[in-house]
Image (cartoon, rainbow, N blue to C red):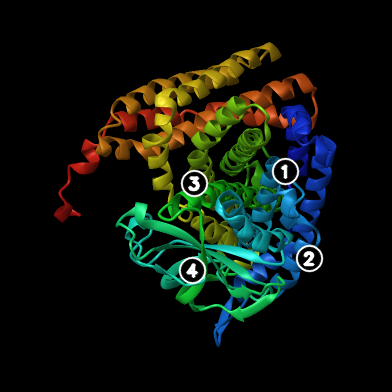
């Protein structure tokens, strides 16, 4: 399937929209600047289009197989992953101490988007490995780091996270897997995990599982959970692979989408593992990986929406059907029909604003890790924490909606496999579910993130947005874009105060959560559109700048008004949701 990387928009963001001066200073040792970023993204886009995307449709048809305990991935995947690792993409943003290139997360984010749009199933292999690497870097002993990180970062070995059990999904306090100490300092891990993406494959090398389990004396609940590093193969003293560890793939999950991704049921039968972090603090260590993965999953929604849009826009310009308003010839390209334009503009208005918000957040992440000033690092990290559930949930909600709209543009052709649109719909759907369902993300936003810094952080964020909206007026002639976003921000600010005031009522908080997160995301997208419109207004009358202004006005006039309905729904409270007795359902 053809894939068109968003290189023109990436150039706009990194050379016109965002100032990368601070990033260049933080990564001066790596020789980083905007030119290097563009060069890397161009090469990554070429790799995704030429190597990864052609495997997407046939990989979906072929799927993965489990025979005699061995997992076989779709044809071409193992070879493509070897090429991906050989080209250095696995090590891009990883720590130089262990063989990484140490480049900004900002570039990594944008490559993750392209990888997800080209082939969502494939992109999970390096994405999960990188998350496991981050958890090991943050919490493991020096010995574990030296043993496992270099080969994981190089791409020779891969990683997976093993949390979910049949009785313990979101509520990990219910998990039953056990870890018993061995005499040599290792642990014998026993239990069964389900839904384990990249749990095994035929790429060669090792697969490093991070497994949540309980020690024998662990208390009940989440405080009794510890994290263990459990490799597929034990590692010999010389760093080579030794005996097969005591775990196996019980079965492959039969899924709605991402068929080329081996999602495994894993059986651990006294497998040797090593404690990562402190006993009983496993969930804390695992959340290092989960928070990274939640941002990654948000980028999956963004990437697949972009891929669906480019296919749908090309089809709409080529497909002749019906008599369009104002067209004298019939049949006309369906791009001339207002409703087709509505669908395409809706997708693109999300994609370009979402990509800009992703870059803004990634820049804060780089500052939070590398800035010399502790207070600056802390504030940047707080903003990333605030936006993480928004990016995960909103990007995947809007991403799924985008694939459905793009499929609708194709009409009947969108419903058959060969065009690839129905695969986009199926693949995009999982992103709303894994790494914490979007309902859980919404609860995290309203119950935890709105409480950060005693409730002040979110209002500080709103102050930052308000100041930038006011500053955008200097570009001139943008009032029809700025004013609606300012009104939506005021609506969000007031609503946030009301939601915070009833935070002690879990029922009211739960009833408001999903609508609140969507409203928050729409305002954040509006903020990005104002910023991009101001840049476009000052940049001259190029086609790209004209398109930015057109999309900003479309968003402000056609999509942002949803915030009024969302506010009304939230203010209606929990009563309409809770009034009906259980037996009436």
**Which mark, residue 397?**
3
Q: Position of residue 396 (x, y in %)?
A: 52, 48
Secondary structure, mark 1, is helix
CA distance for labels 3 and 1? 24 Å
Determine contact: label 4, label 1, CB under 8 Å.
no
The answer to which of marks 4 and 1 sits earlier in the sequence is 1
CA distance for labels 4 and 1? 31 Å
Q: Nearer the viewer, mark 4 or mark 1?
A: 1
CA distance for labels 3 and 2? 32 Å
**Which mark, residue 494?**
none
Q: Position of residue 142 (x, y in %)?
A: 62, 55
The front one of 495 and 277 is 277
**Which mark, residue 107?**
1
Classed neighbour count for the residue bearing mark 3: other residues with Cα under 10 Å, few (<14), some (14–19), many (≥20): many
- Specify the quadrant that holds the N terminus: bottom right
Q: Nearer the viewer, mark 2 or mark 4?
A: 2
Determine contact: label 3, label 2, CB under 8 Å.
no
Residue position marked by numbered label 2 in the rendering: 83
Residue position marked by numbered label 4 in the rendering: 255
Q: Nearer the viewer, mark 3 or mark 2?
A: 2
Q: Position of residue 498 (x, y in %)?
A: 33, 24
Secondary structure, mark 3, is helix
Farthest residue in the bottom direction?
A: 68
């Amino acid at each position: 399937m053809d894939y068109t990387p968003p290189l023109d928009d990436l150039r706009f963001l990194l050379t016109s929209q965002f100032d990368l001066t601070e990033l260049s200073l933080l990564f001066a040792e790596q020789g980083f600047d905007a030119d290097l970023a563009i060069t890397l993204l161009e090469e990554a886009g070429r790799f995704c289009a030429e190597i990864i995307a052609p495997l997407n449709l046939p990989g979906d048809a072929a799927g993965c197989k489990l025979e005699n305990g061995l997992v076989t991935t779709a044809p071409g995947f193992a070879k493509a992953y070897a090429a991906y690792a050989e080209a250095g993409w696995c090590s891009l943003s990883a720590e130089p101490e262990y063989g990484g290139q140490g480049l900004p997360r900002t570039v990594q984010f944008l490559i993750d988007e392209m990888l997800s749009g080209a082939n969502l199933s494939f992109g999970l292999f390096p994405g999960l490995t990188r998350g496991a690497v981050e958890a090991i870097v943050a919490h493991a002993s020096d010995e574990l780091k030296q043993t496992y990180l270099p080969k994981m970062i190089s791409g020779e070995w891969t990683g997976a996270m093993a949390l979910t059990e049949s009785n313990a999904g979101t509520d990990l306090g219910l998990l039953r897997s056990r870890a018993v100490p061995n005499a040599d300092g290792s642990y014998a891990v026993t239990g069964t995990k389900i839904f384990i993406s990249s749990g095994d494959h035929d790429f060669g090398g090792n697969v490093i599982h991070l497994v949540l389990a309980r020690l024998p004396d662990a208390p009940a609940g989440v405080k009794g959970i510890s994290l263990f590093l459990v490799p597929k193969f034990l590692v010999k003293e010389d760093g080579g692979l030794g005996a097969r560890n005591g775990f196996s793939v019980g079965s492959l999950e039969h899924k709605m989408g991402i068929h080329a991704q081996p999602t495994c049921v894993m059986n651990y039968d006294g497998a040797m593992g090593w404690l990562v972090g402190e006993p009983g603090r496993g969930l804390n260590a695992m959340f290092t990986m989960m928070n990274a993965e939640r941002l990654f999953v948000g980028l999956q929604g963004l990437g697949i929406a972009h891929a669906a849009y480019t296919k749908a826009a090309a089809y709409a310009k080529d497909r002749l059907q019906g008599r369009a308003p104002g067209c004298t010839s019939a049949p006309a390209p369906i791009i001339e029909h207002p409703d087709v334009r509505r669908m395409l503009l809706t997708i693109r208005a999300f994609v370009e604003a979402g990509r800009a918000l992703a870059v803004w957040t990634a820049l804060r992440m780089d500052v939070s890790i590398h800035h010399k000033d502790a207070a600056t690092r802390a504030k940047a990290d707080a903003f990333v924490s605030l936006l993480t559930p928004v990016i995960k949930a909103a990007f995947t909600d809007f991403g799924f909606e985008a694939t459905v709209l793009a499929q609708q543009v194709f009409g009947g052709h969108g419903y058959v496999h060969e065009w690839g649109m129905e695969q986009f719909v199926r693949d995009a759907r999982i992103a709303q579910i894994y790494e914490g369902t979007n309902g859980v993300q919404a609860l995290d936003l309203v119950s935890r993130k709105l409480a950060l810094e005693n409730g002040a952080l979110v209002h500080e964020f709103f102050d930052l947005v308000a100041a930038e909206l006011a500053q955008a007026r200097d570009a001139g002639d943008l009032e029809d874009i700025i004013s609606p976003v300012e009104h939506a921000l005021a609506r969000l600010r007031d609503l946030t105060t009301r939601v915070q005031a009833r935070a002690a009522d879990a029922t009211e908080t739960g009833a408001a959560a999903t609508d609140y997160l969507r409203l928050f995301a729409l305002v954040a997208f509006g903020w990005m559109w104002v910023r991009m419109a101001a840049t476009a207004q000052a940049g001259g009358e190029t086609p790209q700048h004209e398109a930015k202004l057109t999309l900003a006005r479309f968003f402000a006039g056609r999509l942002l008004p949803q915030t009024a309905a969302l506010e009304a729904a939230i203010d209606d409270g929990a009563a309409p949701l809770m009034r009906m007795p259980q037996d009436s359902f």
